[in-house]
Image (cartoon, rainbow, N blue to C red):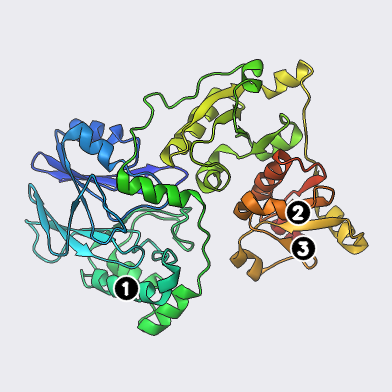
Amino acid sequence: MFLEKIKTPGLSHLSYIIGSGGKAAVIDPRRDCEVYVEKARAEGLEITHIFETHRNEDLLSGSPILANLTGATVYHGPNAAGEVIFARTAREGDCFELGQLKIEVLETPGHTDDHLAFVIHDSEYSEGPVGVFTGDALFVGDVGRTDFYPERKEEVAGLLFDSLQKLCGLGDQAIIYPAHGAGSVCGSGMADREFSTIGHERRNNPRLRISDRDEFIEAKVAEHHYQPPYFRLMERLNLAGSDAAPRVMRPRRLGLEDLSESGADHLVDVREPLAYAAGHLPGAMCLPVGMIPAFAGWFLGEGDRIALIASEEGQLAQAMAHLVRIGLDNVVGGYVGVVPAAAQGKAMRSIPMIGTEEVARRLDQDSGEWTLLDVRDADERQEASIDGSGHIYVGELNTRWEELDRDRHYTLMCASGMRASVAAGWLASKGFEHLDIYLGSMGAWTNASG
């Protein structure tokens, strides 16, 4: 028996390849899917099955692409809010054999209506299943979000409760293999650990410890999640099937003159926030490479022409890989050389960083011409906030920037200054000139307050 997890950085997406007897199955493959073929062949396995736990909202499925590469059959659950044109429908009780392994289908709706779990049985060990691929129903330390059907929020939360009871019925010995880990937008309380069992989760997972169905529904309905606009793109493409990822996951190299003539809709500076704040090209937004999976889908749209600006070639490759995995791959090229451009006399913009003392002084003065704008999420702000600050979630600035006064002075803050840099960069790209960033943000404020 062979089982390996493939983690996609940034998205914290977890996919798997499992095999026995010369055959293999892949669970929830990503768009750039050659990795699964390479691993299967290295183990002497042929990929014959591809299982999707649900229609992903946060990344493009590689299932139709992998099926074309291997000839494997794709299986998806019922009730997918449309036809998954590249897949057959799998239902409760269906079983698939891979050598000594048997993969059994459980219908586990709640996170999405089409959600399935795939239970692993080993024919040589009869005392309960070995494990289960839980998709986005059950994570390590958390359970799936249930906000994708707002008009049915109580119903779908109840469906998830029932599905979780079904998973718990597999037995404490079963190892869980979720589709996401800590850092994913698909849950907010995941443990920083990617291994667990049904028994451990049943005893320790805060949501699984709620035994009353009505109490569970109330807790889930009270949760607050954000849905980036690109989720709608993922929903559509994960029904129709996306094109294969570009063969070369590295953007074309642009010179400074090429950059200005590229016709890009967005100049995306993927350097670290402090480098961006110190000096960036006019019109460029700040989106550090590690933050692309979480925030690119808020500010970049399908078909937008994207030019990347980085410190070095490796950053360009990482940035493009992140964008390709969420279908934002119209990258016209990449530029490296902000500092040399400055040395050549190219005009630069900068955004000052300020500290706690200056923020406190401005709050005391209250001139009426300045706003401390908190861009954390609503749950963070509810836990702790600075009196006198305003609030717009960083992602919602994609449209709500139009509510702001370009002549007003804004200081952007978050938990540390990272998301504040993204927010300030977006506003700068929209022509705001009176900006600065609270370095350290809420963390610095809390520490200064003792």
Earlier in the chain: of badge 2 and badge 1, it is 1
Q: Are marks 2 and 1 in contact (CB under 8 Å)?
A: no
Under circle 1, the secondary element is: helix
Disc 3 target residue? 389
Earlier in the chain: of badge 3 and badge 1, it is 1
Identified by mark 2, the residue type is: Leu
Disc 2 target residue? 404
Instruction: State left or right for residue 435 relative to residue 31.
Output: right
Identified by mark 1, the residue type is: Leu
User: In the image, residue 229 lies at what x, y percent?
Assistant: 51, 51
Q: CA distance from mark 2 to mark 1?
A: 41 Å
Under circle 2, the secondary element is: loop
Q: Nearer the viewer, mark 3 or mark 2?
A: 2
Q: Residues within 10 Å of mark 3 (few under 14, many from 20)?
A: some
Mark number for residue 159?
1
**Residue at 65% in and 47% down:** 418
